[in-house]
Image (cartoon, rainbow, N blue to C red):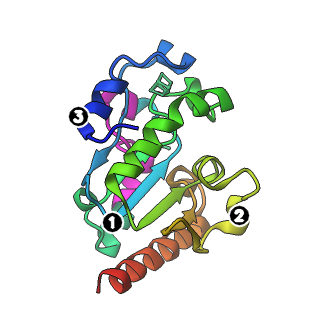
Amino acid sequence: MYETWEELENSIRDCKKCKLCQNRNNIVFGEGNKEADIMFIGEGPGADEDSQGLPFVGKAGQLMNKAFQGLGIDRSKVYIANIVKCRPPLNRVPEDDEVDSCLDYLRNQVMLVKPKIIVLLGSTALKNILGKEYGITASRGNWITQKDILYMPTWHPAALLRDEDKKIEFWKDLKQVVEKYNEITG
Ligand code: URA
Ligand code: SF4
């Protein structure tokens, strides 16, 4: 684990630890407030993220931004990252060997940000952070506390694109996050 952002960012440059390096255009490291109280973790870059090098800038990201605006979440005040930093081909779910290779970067990001709350966006984030025994349908909307961090699993924003009910649940879950944040930070 690196003690500084500079060392961590240098360590990922030109990373070839897994096969996802083969087709990527950009590593999507993450972005936002490096001292955020709230961190969001997605799955992996899509096409737009791969071409821009930034997380959640495509359709799903725009939907997430809308929810942020509606709930008064300032995107520049949170930190946003993904389980894998390079785009899986055809946006498939990252495979276990890819996650195993990449997860230390995210662990290091969490160590440096020291968030109070982590929002897990979708099944891939949930299962790889908290354990394979968790399912997103049963877990979403419910706080899980581990090692002084409060986790809120919710739907992946891409799942909202086709499902109005999930959109409502996503808003409810993020509303809980805002309320908890206000409670913690007074
Ligand atoms: N989906 C993700 O999981 N992450 C992104 O950054 C964009 C889409
Ligand atoms: Fe390295 Fe992660 Fe990209 Fe794999 S996905 S090449 S481990 S940065």
Q: Earlier in the sequence, mark 3 or mark 1?
A: 3
Q: Amino acid at mark 1?
A: Asp
Q: Earlier in the sequence, mark 1 or mark 2?
A: 1
Q: Position of residue 56 (x, y in %)?
A: 38, 45
Whether the residue carrying mark 3 lies under 8 Å from ligand 2 is answered with no
The N terminus lies in quadrant:
top left
User: How many residues crowd around disc 3 within 10 Å: few (fewer than 14), some, or many (20 or more)?
Assistant: few
Per the model, the C-alpha gap separating discs 3 and 1 is 20 Å
Residue furthest to the top in view is: 22
**Is 180 above or below relative to 113?**
below
Q: Name the side, left or right, on which 125 lies relative to 186.
A: right
| Count of picture labels | 3
Q: Name the side, left or right, on which 24 lies relative to 7.
A: right
Per the model, the C-alpha gap separating discs 1 and 2 is 25 Å
Residue bearing mark 1 = 37
Q: Amino acid at mark 2?
A: Thr
Numbered range of the magenta stretch: 49-65
Q: Which mark is residue 137?
A: 2
Q: Position of residue 6 (x, y in %)?
A: 23, 34
Residue bearing mark 3 = 6
- Who's the residue at 43% across and 67% down the image? 117
**Is 86 above or below relative to 42?**
above
